[in-house]
Amino acid sequence: MSVLSRPYFHCEAAAFEHVEEMLWPNGPHCPHCGNAGKIYELKGVRSKPSKKNPEGVERYGLKKCAECRKQFTVRIGTIFEESHIPLHKWLQAIYLMCSSKKGISSNQLARVLEITVKSAWFLSHRIREAMRSGELEPMGGAGKEVEGDETYFGNKDVITTRTKRGKAGLSSKRAVVSLVERGGSVRSFHVDRADKQTVTSIVNENVNKESAFYTDESRLYNDVHGTFAGGSERVHHAASEYVRGPAHTNTLEGYYSIFKRGMKGVYQHCSEKHLHRYLAEFDFRYNNRIKLGVADPERAEKALKNVKGRRLLYRDSFQALS
Ligand SMILES: [Zn+2]
């Protein structure tokens, strides 16, 4: 037996059961009218016959609400809605993305799941939406240490690109600002410009002022240094100073090295428009890492519990590819 032998990775009925357990821990409720009372299980219902399936296919997980008389499954209102990919393949994809430290490319996902690259690409972006944390509480606090740093994904300098009409244009830098609490979570932001104003508001909105705060010598943090009750210090990387007592940004350097290896080695073609979703993916794995007691199966369950209300429309995301 292995993790991959679990029935919900292979059997569609088991996959529905697993997702229902995760999303409806207190039993099903109707997505149309909100009724959580009497709901019928519709067993053995088959879809209309088609050329490919002359006898139709079994409609797993189908339910009917006793109040509004409408039918539904657990897929409604989640990232699985309107997808033709069977639920057990979705569960395989979530597991693979949650357990691969540097991510998994759409090409590889397509080969493993035996779906098209286009489907794999779309499915993986929907899963990244489920990995987005949406955490709003400031991080850190009294006795906690927070590091701030920024990095540039791709070409650090302004690069010349060609627009659809063939005109040359200027593409902005792909700047990423991250904050990490030592021994805790990371939060990354894709920003249009890494300037002092942007960085100051990110730090002020996301870091508890009781924390101790550490950065390198970058001037971007000039306005936030001195505002922390736990003190704040900078190390001078330019002068080859990397650690001075508790002052360092090594935790973020470690995070960025995983992010960069993943983005270079696995996701080579990431358009700027999608960078925030890749960041959500790397943040999610870091924030649910083994060191914090989260193993691969629990990490996958955490992502699965987050699939509600995270729909990403096919047309919206594909516009960005063209
Ligand atoms: Zn209903």
Image (spheres, rainbow, N blue to C red):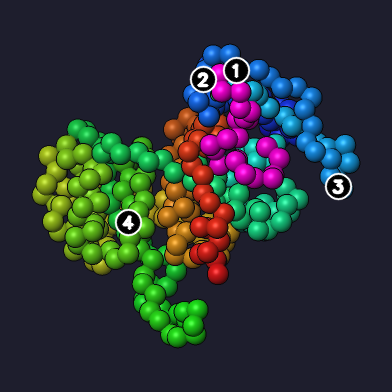
Look at the numbered disc 1 and say if its residue's Cβ is closer than 8 Å to ligand 1.
yes
Label 4 environment density (alpha carbons within 10 Å; few <14, some 14–19, many ≥20): many
Q: Amino acid at mark 3?
A: Lys
Indicate which disc residue 35 carries: 2
Mark 4, secondary structure of its residue: strand
Residue 182 seen in the figure = yes
Q: Which residue is mark 1?
A: 66
Precedes in sequence: disc 1 or disc 2: 2
Label 3 environment density (alpha carbons within 10 Å; few <14, some 14–19, many ≥20): few
Image quadrant of ligand 1 equals top right
What residue span does the magenta drawing correspond to?
66-87
Q: Amino acid at mark 2?
A: Asn
Residue 128 seen in the figure = no
Gap between marks 4 and 2 measured at Cα: 43 Å
Label 1 environment density (alpha carbons within 10 Å; few <14, some 14–19, many ≥20): some
Give yes or no for contact between labels 1 and 2 (Cβ–Cβ under 8 Å).
yes
Precedes in sequence: disc 1 or disc 3: 3
Indicate which disc residue 177 carries: 4
Mark 2, secondary structure of its residue: loop
Indicate which disc residue 266 carries: none
* Outermost residue toward the bottom in this view: 167
Q: Give the prevailing secondary structure in the magenta stretch.
A: loop
